[in-house]
Image: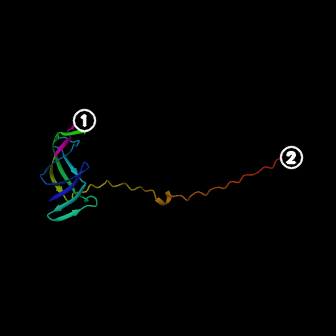
């Protein structure tokens, strides 16, 4: 069984007990996290594709450690111009272990709203008619 899940803007194909590296997550080591943006689930040949996500599906992972990735060297040069720039970068990563893939996880229900006793018909009033005002002209008295 595997799933394709969107984690921090990237898509990963994950299986149970697999370890993956993702961009740094703001969680403590040992914490569990649920990813509910599951795009596809394959359960023994039975493929369930979401539009865009599979409803009720989630992937649970455990944070193993936070670390930095390998150094990447960026070197720029323009020939015959004397232009050379060397720059390095190490990406902050989080190592995750996939604990479980749920195809139909329990969906959290929103709390029920209290029904108010105000009737809706009384709340709507008929639109008020516009009063037409006419200007009265006062005849000037001739003196």
Q: Which residue is mark 1?
A: 85
Image point 15% across, 65% down: which residue? 45
Dot 2, crowdedness within 10 Å: few (<14), some or many (≥20)?
few
Q: Is residue 114 above or below residue 65?
A: below
Coloration of the structure image: rainbow
The C terminus lies in quadrant: top right
Image point 26% across, 37% down: which residue? 80
The N terminus lies in quadrant: bottom left
Q: Which residue is mark 2?
A: 142
In the rendered structure, which disc, 1 or 2, sits on the residue that comes first in sequence? 1
Image point 15% across, 51% down: which residue? 98
Left or right for 21, reference 126: left
* Disc 1 to disc 2: CB gap under 8 Å: no
Q: In the rendering, which numbered label is found on residue 94?
A: none
Nearer-the-camera pick, 100 or 106: 100
Nearer-the-camera pick, 136 or 35: 35
Dot 1, crowdedness within 10 Å: few (<14), some or many (≥20)?
few
Q: Is residue 32 above or below residue 130?
A: above
Residue 57, picture quadrant: bottom left
Whole-percent x and y of residue 35? Answer: 22, 51
Q: Which residue lies most toward the bottom here?
A: 46
Q: Is residue 143 above or below residue 46?
A: above
**Residue 81 on the magenta segment:** yes
Q: CA distance from mark 1 to mark 2?
A: 95 Å
In the image, which residues are magenta?
80-95
Q: Give the main secondary structure of the magenta stretch.
A: strand
Mark 1: which secondary structure?
A: strand
Image point 71% across, 54% down: which residue? 134
Left or right for 64, reference 114: left
């Amino acid at each position: 069984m595997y799933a394709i899940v969107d984690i921090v803007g990237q898509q990963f194909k994950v299986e149970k007990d697999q370890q993956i590296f993702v961009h740094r997550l703001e969680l403590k080591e040992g914490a569990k996290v649920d990813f509910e943006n599951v795009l596809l689930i394959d359960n023994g040949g039975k493929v369930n594709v979401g539009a865009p996500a599979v409803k009720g599906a989630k992937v649970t992972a455990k944070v193993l450690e936070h670390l930095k990735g390998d150094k990447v060297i960026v070197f720029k040069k323009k020939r015959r111009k004397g232009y050379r720039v060397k720059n390095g970068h190490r990406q902050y990563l989080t190592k995750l272990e996939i604990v479980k893939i749920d195809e139909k996880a329990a969906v959290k229900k929103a709390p029920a709203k209290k029904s108010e006793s105000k009737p809706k018909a009384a709340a709507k009033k008929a639109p008020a008619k516009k009063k037409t005002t006419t200007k009265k002209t006062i005849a000037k008295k001739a003196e």
